[in-house]
Amino acid sequence: MTIVRQTMVYDGPGGPFEGVIAYEDEVETPRPGVLVVPNVLGQKEADNRKAEDLARLGYVGFACDVFGQGKRKTRESENAAEYINALQADRPLLRDRLAVSLRVLQDHRQVDAAKCAAIGFCFGGKSVLDMARSGQDVRGVVSFHGVYDAPPYHTVQPIAAKVLVCHGWDDPLGPPDAVTALAAELTAGQADWQLHAYGHAGHAFTDADNRGGPPGFGYEEKADRRSWAAMRAFLAELFT
């Protein structure tokens, strides 16, 4: 078995956009698709590897782009949050860019369009929650160390997508009151939701390239491993 990468350049509001789809070369029947939404830095190699990891699990992974082709940051960039700040200020635009990325995944010849999910990290974790909130055509979403504030627009009720939140308990961007507010929001929205909180883990606990940061930020191996296992079980249940 070989994992194939395919670069996808696609149009959308404020585009063009560029992402990477990964799938097994021996796939003969359509597989479930899983959208991968990047963190604050935008589409990058780490996201492409996540798409490949999903392909090894038997899915088609799509590391999408919500900033725009060529709009990328590094941790050393000045104003590394420039592109997410623009989308934070325009959550409807973020919603619409996510919807376009999802359609690109659903339209791929290897994908069963009726069986799609989305996972996201940091800002991507916030993004996939917005996909559930806005009623996009996914069976479920997984937020890894996301940000939990609700969007300013009307959200659907009931929330049809199942929700898994993988949270680092020491995350300063997700203090207990924000976690409680998200739980209340999802409950009011009649969502099928679950929360996994990991002790001694903070923001970006899945990011193996982010080590030795300030307290509350950075990689934590146990939380990374356990949250990926939780995601695997969640996706298996979604698609059975």
Image: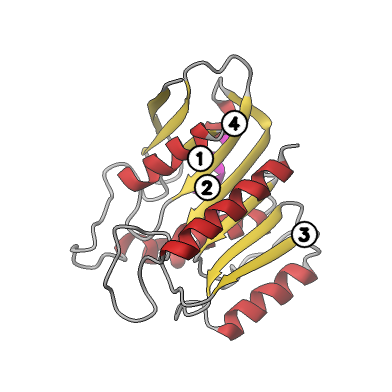
Comes first in the chain, label 3 or label 1? 1
Name the amino acid, label 2: Leu
Label drawn at residue 106: 4
Name the amino acid, label 4: Gln
Label drawn at residue 101: 1
Cα distance, mark 3 to mark 1?
Answer: 24 Å
Comes first in the chain, label 4 or label 2? 2
Label 4 neighbour load within 10 Å: few <14, some 14-19, many 20+: many
Comes first in the chain, label 2 or label 3? 2
**Label 4 residue SS:** helix
Q: Which residues are magenta?
A: 95-103
Cα distance, mark 4 to mark 1?
Answer: 9 Å
Label drawn at residue 98: 2
Q: Pinpoint residue 5: horizontal percent, then vertical percent.
A: 38, 27
Q: Which residue extends farthest bottom?
A: 177
Based on the picture, tell me whether residue 217 belongs to the magenta stretch.
no
Label 2 neighbour load within 10 Å: few <14, some 14-19, many 20+: many
Residue that label 3 marks: 192
Comes first in the chain, label 4 or label 3? 4
The quarter holding residue 188 reads bottom right
Of 61 and 234, nearer the camera is 234
Q: Are marks 2 and 1 in contact (CB under 8 Å)?
A: yes
Cα distance, mark 2 to mark 3?
Answer: 21 Å
Q: Pinpoint residue 134: horizontal percent, then vertical percent.
A: 66, 55
Q: What secondary structure is the stretch in magenta mostly built from?
A: helix
The quarter holding residue 122 reads bottom left
